[in-house]
Amino acid sequence: MSKNKFIAYENVFDEATLRGIFKLSGQGYFEAIEGPISTGKESNVFTVKYKDEKRVAKIYRTSANFKKMYDYMKSDPRFSGIKGTKLTIIYAWARKEFRNLLRAREGEVNAPTPFAVHQNILIMEYFDAPLLQNNGPKDPKMFYEKLIKEVIKLFKAGLVHADLSEFNILNYKEKPILIDFSHALDTRYPNVQRLLKRDIENLVRYFNKRGLKLDEKTEFERVWVHKK
Ligand SMILES: Nc1ncnc2c1ncn2[C@@H]1O[C@H](COP(=O)(O)OP(=O)(O)OP(=O)(O)O)[C@@H](O)[C@H]1O
Ligand SMILES: [Mg+2]
């Protein structure tokens, strides 16, 4: 990556993050940062250039609310041993999203393939698609059926998304792509039933506003029946 591009982001990121970006680009995961797609609560999301393609770099800010991340992670059996400083927690959070995405992809869920994680930086597949929130489905019933199949696949792979709504679903040519997996939890998590219910409620609310007559309990059961 060119030194100039590097300098352009110096105001956004601290030294350690800049070194991390440099390391990942040195390892060949991308060639240059292109531009920002989104500035979220805890992260900045950029497209990056990789050969003739784009990839996504999601960079958690080191000023993120790590206490909330910690509270959330400590009940997940995969991260229950986690302790340490602010950076340890934020880096674990990025690793958690990476591992969630890997597991989702192993379960053949429509979600970005993750390529690398280093410190607070996650590199993943880019989809040139709008959020469902900004681009509603042409055929809500068909879209919903595709979507619930993704939720079931994810559940069978051992995960509940836990932040699912029209804000974390892309409409890729009328096909749902799930994104933003940092909250996703192992199905062995004690509160998993409540979190799955909330995900389903969000979807049912969105699709019932668009003419469907879904019943929350029925839709929840369609997923929960696969609990091991
Ligand atoms: N793989 C991707 N392909 C295309 N666009 C993406 C991808 N990942 C994220 N985006 C875009 O970036 C936005 C923010 O990403 P994401 O939802 O993962 O983070 P966030 O909501 O900001 O999370 P947080 O609150 O943890 O900071 C999304 O709404 C979407 O527009
Ligand atoms: Mg999001």
Image (cartoon, helix red, strand yellow):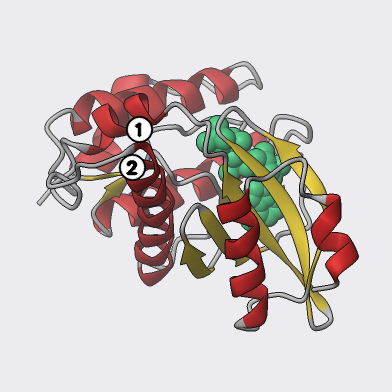
Question: From the viewer's perspective, is the residue at label 2 or at label 1 nearer?
Answer: 2
Residue 44: percent from the left, percent from the top?
A: 67, 42
Where is residue 197? Give x, y as percent. 30, 25
Q: Is residue 136 left or right of residue 59?
A: right
Q: Is residue 53 visible?
A: yes
Residue 96 position, x and y percent, is 35, 52
Ligand 1: quadrant of the figure = top right
| Residue topped by disc 2 | 89
Q: Residue at x 23, y 54 (%)?
A: 158
Query: What distance separates the C-alpha of mark 2 from that of mark 1?
Result: 7 Å
Please determine whether, in this image, residue 107 is positioned above or below residue 196.
below
Most distant residue in the right direction: 4
**Residue occupying the point 44% across, 51% down:** 94
Can you identify the residue that label 1 sits on?
A: 69
Q: Is mark 1 within 8 Å of ligand 1?
A: no
Q: Is residue 168 visible?
A: no
Badge 2 amino acid? Ile
- The reply to whether callout 2 and callout 1 are in contact (CB within 8 Å) is yes
Using the image, determine if residue 129 lies above or below residue 38: below
Instruction: Give left or right: position of 11 versus 79.
Output: right
> Is residue 131 shown left or right of residue 43?
right
